[in-house]
Amino acid sequence: MMSCFRLPAVLPLSVLMLAVFVLAGCIRDKPSESEASSPTAPQLEKEGQKADPGETFRVKFETSKGNFIVEAYSGWAPLGAARFKELVESGFYDGCRFFRIVPGFIVQWGINGDPEVQKKWYDNKIRDDDVLTENFRGTLSFAKSGPNTRTTQLFINYGNNSASLDPQGFAPFAKVIEGMDVVDAINAEYGERPDQGRIQTQGNAYLNKEFPNLDYIIKATILEPGAEKENATEKKEASESKSSESPESSKSPESPKSGQSNQSKSDSSREVKSNGEKDAASEEKAEKKPEKKKESPKPETIEEIK
């Protein structure tokens, strides 16, 4: 009689245990909510330069140190790219100083030299873009003081700053495609000493007085499609024309370049040569050289950079 009562009790218990094991196996096969919403996969797809570039445009920066060209991508940061284009088209960056240079980290600019112009943009903020591309060397991002505070200030990354800047929400919208050596050579003697508050209120008058050797932007221009190729062709043709000078110049015991340099420095060096025609041609070249320097004089006052 006792065995008859134990048998029914054992069977339900084994069935119950089997059901628990089956249920546990099903739960393990189904990912948890945290696993299902993990951002790991999307981040891997977006790291580096893998973001869709979208519409692009190029901007040439003529600076006191030389020229460089950047290419902007609406697919990287649409709001940032649009604001950048708006500022360039308005001439906002013309005359701006590179006021913050931290070697190995960034070079920063974007406060207009005229305080009255700067006031118009001071509170003209844009919302943040998602960070779809890393802050690697040569990329441009807008500076900001917190969420949704981007206005006019930009920086170029000197190194790969993705580990520190990406998590803070700095979204690259462009990169330097030509002239990174010029960007690297921007004068860094003042470091981070210029006070941004005084630049906002006093403009280039303050910077010219306190930090006269700052490099600056002469002009920023949006390039028409194919314009950079035309410039490259012109440079190539100019180089080829120089290399195919008349045979008479090659007969001189001095190289053409050194001869021209000596002629432009003093009258005594021109007297060494006996060919008067060569002297006259050299003098014409020497007279043209100062004109090239006058094309981009360093502004002394705010009025001259308007």
Image (cartoon, rainbow, N blue to C red):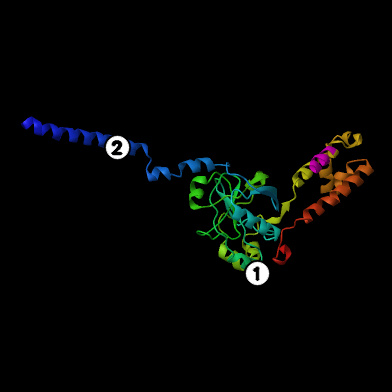
Q: From which residue to which does the magenta span run?
A: 233-240
Which residue is the site of mark 2? 24
Direction from residue 55 to residue 171 in the image, left or right: left
Q: Position of residue 194 (x, y in %)?
A: 58, 60
Q: Is residue 189 visible?
A: no
Q: Secondary structure at mark 1?
A: helix
Q: Position of residue 37 (x, y in %)?
A: 43, 45
Q: In the rendered view, would you say 86 is above or below 53?
A: below
Q: Which mark is residue 203?
A: none
Q: In the rendered view, would you say 251 is above or below 234?
A: above
Mark 2 or mark 1, which is nearer the start of the sequence? 2
Indicate whether residue 258 is drawn in magenta.
Answer: no
Q: Amino acid at mark 1?
A: Glu
Which residue is the site of mark 1? 116
In terms of secondary structure, what is the magenta stretch mainly? helix
Which of 88 and 30 lies nearest the eye of the viewer? Answer: 30
Q: Secondary structure at mark 2?
A: helix
Which of 274 and 26 lies nearest the eye of the viewer? Answer: 26
Work out which quarter of the rendered image holds the C terminus and state it: bottom right
Residue at 75%, 45% in the rendered image: 228
Given this view, does label 1 or label 2 mark the residue nearer the observer? 2
